[in-house]
Amino acid sequence: MQKAPIRDYRDLIVWQKAMDLALACEKVCVELPSRASSVATQIRRAAVSIPANIAEGNGRFSRPDYIKYLSIANGSVKELETHLEFSARAYGRTAAIEAALKLAVDVSRLLAGLVRALRGKSKDPIR
């Protein structure tokens, strides 16, 4: 079975999963109590930065830049996991938080795989 070609970042499974994660985090934020507005803001910011950094890295013209932005995206995943874990401890562990944490693990794993694949390729520009 032949894979469809990657035309841009939207075709990357990691970007698609990161978008799913951002939407899952929006559900978490809606369910948080109003007194948790500051952590909800941090969750939203970190969650949206993940697919944004994947896209930005993909738009760069060098492989090292791409890897750098994927690393930034992975750092945002870890930041997001921390905000979600804080929310679970402070306001109660919910199904929405658990779903978001599971997606975060998946996104982190996919990012690591993409970085490994990019490091295994030549140093030529991506495009």
Image (spheres, rainbow, N blue to C red):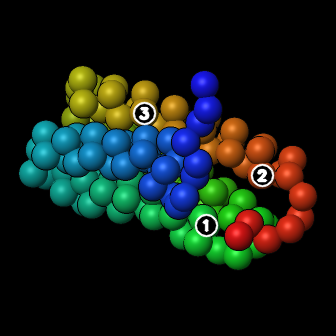
Q: Is residue 124 left or right of residue 74?
A: right
Q: Around disc 1, counting alpha carbons within 10 Å, would you say few (fewer than 14), some (14 to 19), or many (20 or more)?
A: many
97 with respect to 2 (left or right):
left
Residue 89 spot, x, y in % from top left: 33, 32
Residues at circles 3 and 2 in contact by the CB criterion of under 8 Å: no
Labelled pair 3, 1 in contact (Cβ < 8 Å): no
Q: Nearer the viewer, mark 3 or mark 2?
A: 2
Give the residue displayed 49% in from the left and 50% down from the top: 11
Q: Which residue is mark 1?
A: 57
Q: Is residue 1 above or below residue 34?
A: above
Task: Give neighbour class at mark 3: few <14, some 14-19, many 20+ (Cα, 10 Å).
Answer: many
Circle 1: residue type: Gly
Q: Position of residue 81 (x, y in %)?
A: 46, 41
Q: Residue furthest front?
A: 1
In terms of secondary structure, where does tag 1 sit? helix
Q: In the drawing, what numbered circle is on residue 88?
A: none
**Horizontal side, residue 24 vs residue 59: left or right:** left
In the picture of the structure, the residue carrying the numbered disc 3 is 103
Crowding at dot 2, Cα within 10 Å, few <14 / some 14-19 / many 20+, comes out as some
The quarter of the image holding the C terminus is bottom right
Can residue 16 be seen here? The reply is yes
Label 3 amino acid?
Answer: Leu
Q: Alpha carbon of mark 2 to alpha carbon of mark 1: how far?
A: 12 Å
Mark 2 lies on residue: 118
Query: How far apart are the two marked residues, 3 and 2, measured between alpha carbons?
Result: 22 Å
* Sequence-wise first label, 2 or 1: 1
Name which of mark 3 and mark 2 comes first in the sequence: 3
> Given the current orientation, which residue lies at the most extreme bottom position?
61
Amino acid at pointer 2: Leu
Residue nearest the observer in this picture, 10 or 4: 4
